Amino acid sequence: MFVLRGGRVLDPGSRTDAVLDVAIDGDRIARVGTDLSADQVVDVSGFAVAPGFIDLHSHAQSLPGRRLQAFDGVTTALELEGGRAPIEEAYAREAADGSPINYGFSASWAAARMAATTGVTLDGGMATLFRKIGDPEWQRAASASELTQILDRISRDVAAGSLGIGILSGYAPGVDPAEYLAVAELAAAAGVPTFTHCRDLIELTPDTLIDGAEEVVRAAGTTGAHMHYCHVNSTSVRHVDRVLALVERCRAEGGRITTEAYPYGSGATGIGAAFLAPERLGERALKPTSLVYLPTGERVADEARLRELRETDPGGAVIVEFFDESEPADMAVLRKSLLFDDAIVASDAMPVLGVPSADAWPVVGSTHPRTAGCFSRALRLWREEGYPLLDAVRRCTLLPAEVLDALRNKGWLRAGADAEVIVFDAGAITDQATYAESTRLSTGMRHVIVNGEFVVRDGSLVPDARPGRPVRAT
C-alpha cells in the first residue's frame, strides 16, 4: 500500500475539493482521509489529485497513442464510435500486446455493414474499416438479407461483451433511416448504449434522407435506447444551437442522450469519407486547401489532388479545418458544445503515423494534436475562463463513467474504487501539441496511476508499465 500525501483531492462524485490523503492498496483505493499511513508515502502537496480521465472516443489504440494520452491524464481510452469486429478478436489482439492504460471497444456497425455488403474479412482491427471508408458499396441502402446479416453480427458482438454499438452513419449517406432505428432497437433490447457519428444536418445537405440530429433524438424517443451523440461540435459546426436545443428537448421528454465534444476547431478522418468528396466540400464551406493530408503533411492543393488521394489512399488520415481557432467567434461556438449541460470531454484521438517503432520514446510521428492534448487543453481553456476545476474534472471523469455500467467503479476517489488516479499542477497543466508538432506531450501531469501502478511518475514515463486492462460489458 502507498499513500498520496497532502494533495488537493477532487472527487466529483462526492463534490469533494479538499486537501486530503489517498491510500492505494493493490488495484483499489483503500481510503481517502487525513493523516493516512503506509510504508510508502508520495508527497503530492501543491498538486491536484483526481480520478483518471476516461476517454470514450479514442482511435489511438496503439502503444504510442496510449502513451501520449497517458500524459494527458487518460487512464481509460475506449474505441466506441467506430468500434471493432469481431469483438473477441479485437480484445485478444490488445491483450497480446499489453497496454499502459485501460482499453475497450463497442460492436462496429460500420464493420458489420462492410462485411455484409462488400464481403470483406474482418480481423478485429481498424485498418479494414479505414481502407473501406470511401467504398460506395457499403454506403448504400441494404437489402433485407444484408440487414439481417448486419444485425446478426452486431448481436453476436454485443453478446460477447462489447461495450455498446458504434454507428458511423455520417459516413454512409445512403443508409435507410429504418436501419438506424433497427440498430437502436437492438441496443435497447440488449441494454447497451449506441455511439453515433450522426448523418449530415439538413442545413448542410438539404437532400439528406433525414436530418442527422433528428435521427439521433428520434431513436432515443421511439426505442428507449441510450443514444450517445459523438463530437457534437464537429458535426453541428455553426448549427450547434439548434442541435443542442433539440437534444435538450428530447431529454426533457424522457429520452436518454449524452453528448461529447473536443476543444479544437479541426477534425480528422479518412480522406475517402463521403462528405469530403470534392463536389460536397461546399456544404461545409470547405475547400481542398481546408484539408491537410497527414501521411505527407501536405495541404491539399486543389480538387485534382484531392481526387487522386481519395482514389489511391481512401483511408489516409486527413485534418479537416472546420473552424478558425484564431477567430474568437468560432471559438465561442466551440465552447457552447463543451459547456452544454453534462457534456463530456472526448478526444476523438487519431492513430500516430510514421513512428519508427511502436516502443520508441519519445513518440515521433504525426497525428491530430487532440491525441496528445485534448484534456489538458480543455482544462487550460476552462482555467482561463474561471470555470470551476471540480466541474471541469467531472466532465472528464464521472460523466463518462456514468455512460457505461462497466465503468461504474471508475471516475471516483473513494474507498473501493479502481485505483486510477492522476496528479497534476492545476495552475500549469496545458497542451503542447500543435498541428505542426502533434506529438508534443502535455505539461503539468505529475503522476498517472493505472490499476495501482505508476505509468507516469514524477513527470516521466515508466517505460515497461503495462497495467492497462480490458473494459468489457458483463
Image (tube, helix red, strand yellow):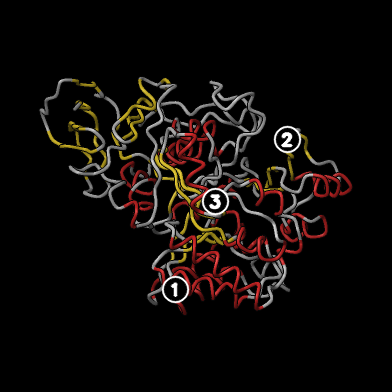
Name the N-terminal-most of marks 1 and 3.
1
Q: What is the crowding at mark 1: few (fewer than 14 residues within 10 Å), some, or many (at least 20)?
A: few
Please report contact status of discs 2 and 1: CB closer than 8 Å, yes or no: no
Residue at 69 percent of width and 67 percent of height = 173
Comparing 395 with 268, the one in front is: 268
Q: For residue 256, which quarter of the picture?
A: bottom left
Disc 1 secondary structure class: helix
| Disc 2 from disc 3: Cα separation | 27 Å
In this rendering, does residue 238 appear at all?
no
In this rendering, does residue 70 appear at all?
yes
For residue 122, above or below residue 241: above
The residue pinned by badge 3 equals 334
Picture coordinates of residue 437, whole percent (x, y):
62, 27
Comparing 312 with 390, the one in front is: 312
The residue pinned by badge 2 equals 295
The residue pinned by badge 1 equals 249
Residue type beneath disc 1: Arg
